[in-house]
Amino acid sequence: MKKSYIVKRILYSVFIFFVVLTLNFFIPRIGVDDPAERYYPPQGNMSDAEYEIIKELTREQYGFDVSTPRQYLNYLSDLFLEGNMGTSFRSGSPAVTDLIIDRLPWTLVLSVSTLLLGLIVGILIGVVAAMKRGRWQDTMLLNASTIMVALPAFFIALVFSFFLGFEAELFPAYTNPDMVSDFSWSLDSLRMVAYNAALPVISMAFGSIIGYAQGTRNAVIAVTGEDFILTARSKGLKPNAIRYKHTLRNAMLPIVTSLGMSISGLIGGQVVIEQIFNWHGMGTLFLEANNTNDYPLMMGIMLLLSAFTIVAILVTDLIYVLLDPRVTVGEKR
Amino acid sequence: MTDKKLPIQQRMLTFLKKRAIGTGRFFKRIWAHPKGKIGLTVVSLLVIVAVFAPWIAPYDPYDVADRTTKGLTPSLQHPLGTTINTGVDIFSMLIYGTRISLIVGVTAGVCIAFVGAILGVMAGYIGGFADNLIMRTVDVLLVIPSLPLVIVLTNVLGRDYWIIIFIFVALGWGGLSRNIRSLVLVIKNSNYVKAAELAGASRWRIMTKHILPGTSHLLIMSTALGSAGIMVAEAGLSFLGLGDPTRISWGRMLAEAQGGGALLFGHWWWIIAPGIGIFLAVFSFMRIGIVMEEVLNPRMKQSTGIHKIFKTLSGDYINEVFDSMEETEQPTTSERSAAKA
């Protein structure tokens, strides 16, 4: 039963990926007859004849000279056979894949450290708040959440870059470009990355910490009310054994599932944070692409981010099914 | 059915009277709620500021002639000083910024509630192909990172604020309709819906008269929370310089502060002021949403206030609704897991 569910779930993710892929292909074609017009909008000082020639060249270069279904097939075969997401509109026509690979590690540094910081600190705070339910620890989390939930991460980032970056000069308010250009796997270089990443990570982590803390708190409290905890208690198990072996282990499951969904929001929000600190990541690459109407690059980044989310949701779903004995699968979805 | 004989004007008048009394009572109950006063006060204050902005603001931030010395520090004439790059009164910008936040947030929030409710009820009650189509669309909407997708669509469709509202609505209904569907799947099997079906009520009547009212508490809270979320998203979009280029918004003020040298010159109030605006709007909308939910669904006592916001965001809220329903109507285990899936 479980095996067939897993296969179905994977196939479904592949289906979703194809829908996203198709959307990705068609969005730049919304509202224009000729995609070349979108990729190369008319410039002010250009005569009609000149523009026709340029459009012709654009069509050839980006493969718009065949019918739309044919273009779609070409797009698919390029992507899956060669791993080629198209050619960027930048000078020198670099491949989209190369541009993304250059930025990907830097973006991952930020997202992974934010996620880890949020998870570790958030779960710790949440467990404490749940165990001291109604006491000052819990109230403090409640008050902090009340304020933090209404403060956008980019505002926190701005305030930090002002007070900690410009005024106190504790951390760099803008990323030092040397961090990227002089990078090597040495201790100094890594320390520099950590130094530059501190403010962006901390400002993004606030939201994650509060979110995971609240999630953990609620999950722990919900599990505490379950029958098997009562059973464990009436068996005469020690409170600590119940706490760590029964309560926490089961409370972690909802946290695992919420991880998958939170990754989509994390990726989206990071665009603004990278812009504030001028971080050399995919978010700034995406905004550069948007400002120059570099559609192949924009859609390449969108595709990759969506793929990340799909995989994250799939993995967390599967972990949930494998770990939780109570989940019954095979019912109509 | 005696009122059927009355002339139409008379009937409409009684209907409106009833509605007005009902709305008045609803607001009274919100006011009576321990946390309702602060939310209601701040929301009304924001609405007043937005509507009467030209009378409240000391200067017109859109008027190029109404500009003074650049980079003034706060004084009596300029409570928040002027901008360093253009010399516009920051306090007036703050007041005008309320407009775009509220318009975009509230309009998009209400439209999302409409679309989400219609599609969610259809998916849950009609089922079959409609259900499949709607829920698969939701799955797609939820995996594409929303801010990048909004940016791509504004690039393709344009950046007027009503286009931005349209994009937010088109992308934002997914989570709500999924929750509504879960709730409808349970309500659908309740005795009063079965009785209505046996009595021969039409599908439309059942959906609008019997099922939709049962989801009202979820709907009204989601509208308020959704509006709050969209205000944040709009501020982020404007902050990136991708909002409506012709309107002043809090996000754009923050962007101007960052780009215009507020950081370098130490004009911290220029950054803090729009942030407080965003905070107040988001905070009060969340508050009022929770209070309205508690007024409409007093059965649910498991969690209150801020915990409910996080539970709604993480999807636990719907489980608590099921738990609170169990006291009166018992959804079977298979129904519940089908609803959650």
Image (cartoon, coloured by chain):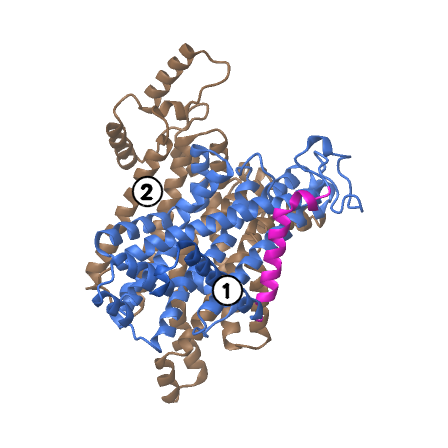
Three-letter residue code for mark 2: Val
- Position of residue B98 measured from the top left corner of the image (x, y, whole percent): 61, 47
Q: Secondary structure at mark 1?
A: helix
Q: Is residue A120 visible?
A: no
Q: Nearer the viewer, residue B170 or B254?
A: B170
Q: Chain of mark 2?
A: A
Q: Is residue B317 visible?
A: yes
Above or below residue A311? Residue A56 is above
Q: Secondary structure at mark 2?
A: helix
Is B38 contained in the magenta span? yes
Chain depicted in brown: A
Residue B323, image quadrant: bottom left
Are there few (<14), some (14-19), or many (20+) residues within 10 Å of tag 2? many
Residue beneath the point at 39% across and 36% down: A299
Residue beneath the point at 31% across and 36% down: A83
Residue beneath the point at 51% across and 49% down: B105
Above or below residue B272? Residue A42 is above
Question: What color does chain B have in the rendering?
Answer: blue
Q: Which residue is mark 1?
A: B21
Above or below residue B108? Residue A146 is below
Residue A20: image tag: 2
In this image, A274 relative to A76: left or right?
right
Q: Nearer the viewer, residue B169 or A306?
A: B169
Q: Chain of mark 1?
A: B
Three-letter residue code for mark 1: Ile
- Position of residue B146 measured from the top left corner of the image (x, y, whole percent): 43, 46
